[in-house]
Amino acid sequence: MEEYKKRIIDDLIKEKLESKGAILLEGPKWCGKTTSCEQVAKSILYMANPRFVKQNLMLADSDPEILLRGDTPRLIDEWQIAPKLWDAIRFEVDQRRSFGQFILTGSSVPINTSEIIHTGTGRFTWLKMRPMSLFESKESNGSVSLENLFNKKEKIYGESNLTLEDIAFLICRGGWPIATYLKGKSALSQAIDYYDAVVNIDLSRVDNIKKDPEKIKRIMASYARNQGTQISYNTILEDIKINEEDNISVKTVTSYIDALKRIFVIEDMKAWNPNLRSKTAIRTADTRYFIDPSIASSSLGFGPGDLINDLNTFGIMFETLAIRDLRIYAESIDGTIYHYRDKNNLECDAVIHLKNGNYGLVEIKLGGDKLIEEGAKNLLKLKSIIDTDKMKAPSFLLVLTAIGNIAYTREDGVIVVPIGCLKN
């Protein structure tokens, strides 16, 4: 394995350690949580180490303070298998009266909150880690900074060498850290293995209720086909029914999707509700996304060649990749991503909203003059109906593309950036 690839969240972890007693880092399996935390931890407890797991669980029940001893910050990996550690850590943070004491990581088995007495308010802070962005995995050269788009610090220019074939491969490979060190089929197999683990093991472990692998596959395939839409669970149910006698219900669909959210496989997007000049009804349903595009491609059994031969599906998958990267970049600058769509079907794929009230509007397109023009028109139309007497004007209008040689600013002020140029 090559040297550690720096993650954007690394700096956030260090920043949070300076102001809180403990950090809880959550996210999907295999996204690199433990490895990132190992870079800053001064001592480590691997709770799920098979050699010591029984001993660790016994001590968590009888004398948890022993498990908390060690140089700080102390990493406690897979802490959630012993939920009682939460209150022990909260108490220890109070006793020590110091910041940067503990880092907790966990993903595959959600915590049993019935064993937790105190919420941890004021002692803990939460961070979410996702699979790697293209900048972190070194496929994006980072010549255009999202932060600088808000600050308007520099003229927009960058060059990208990523081809449509490259993007198809990166969608199916995903941002799983181990895959970024591999090539070809070996890299692609990591996402497939992840999907198989979710279907056959992980989802049933969420609540220890056995789930039907075939139903999981059908639900995930429907989600993959409908990414970037506000499809309802009832519509998903109709989409996956094989025949009228099929015994699957909307309650089952809901419980399975909730379980997928709890293990960070699905990450839907909230709707944006701006102040508009006219009374336009805004659709408020969540927009459907997987946390990584490779889960979607694995759900459909698609490889890079399949995407090249089906550009409609390619566009859907690329949107998920772009949303993943935008979420990672935005969170590092105190931003959140939303989606906009109104009753007239005017849509904006991503609204990046910062805590200071600044925001940028983003359309996501594969590329090419026709699609870029379409995206620019959407952005300009949305900008024109925002009531700037009641809220700020957008800091920028951005068409984010899969392909294209250069990043540039159009005469109408819309910025066009290939994803191979973007960073936080």
Image (cartoon, rainbow, N blue to C red):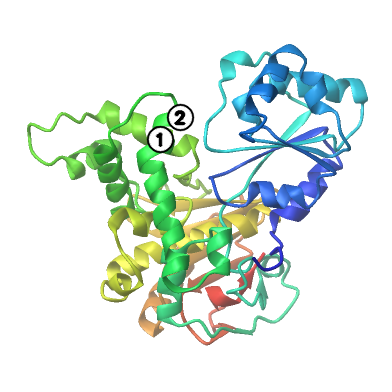
Horizontal and vertical percent position of residue 111: 57, 26
Horizontal and vertical percent position of residue 143: 67, 78
Q: Quick one: which residue is furthest to the left in this view? A: 244
Snapshot quadrant of residue 239: top left
Position of 3 with respect to 219 (left or right) is right
- Say what amino acid the circle numbered 2 marks: Val
Q: Secondary structure at mark 1?
A: helix
| Residue 205 showing in the rendered view | yes
> Cα distance, mark 1 to mark 2?
6 Å
- Disc assigned to residue 46: none
- Say what amino acid the circle numbered 1 marks: Leu
The image quadrant where one finds the C terminus is bottom right
Horizontal and vertical percent position of residue 374: 38, 74
Q: Secondary structure at mark 2?
A: loop
- Disc assigned to residue 203: 1
Horizontal and vertical percent position of residue 25: 67, 41
Snapshot quadrant of residue 376: bottom left
Position of 330 with respect to 309 (left or right) is right
Please name whichever residue, 225 or 412, is drawn nearer the observer in this view of the structure.
225
**Residue linked to disc 2:** 206
Check the image and report above or below for 108 versus 176: above
- Whether pointer 1 and pointer 2 mark residues with C-beta atoms closer than 8 Å, the reply is yes
Write the residue at 20% across / 43% down.
Answer: 240
Please name whichever residue, 246 or 233, is drawn nearer the observer in this view of the structure.
246
Q: Badge 2: how crowded within 10 Å, few (<14), some, or many (20+)?
A: many
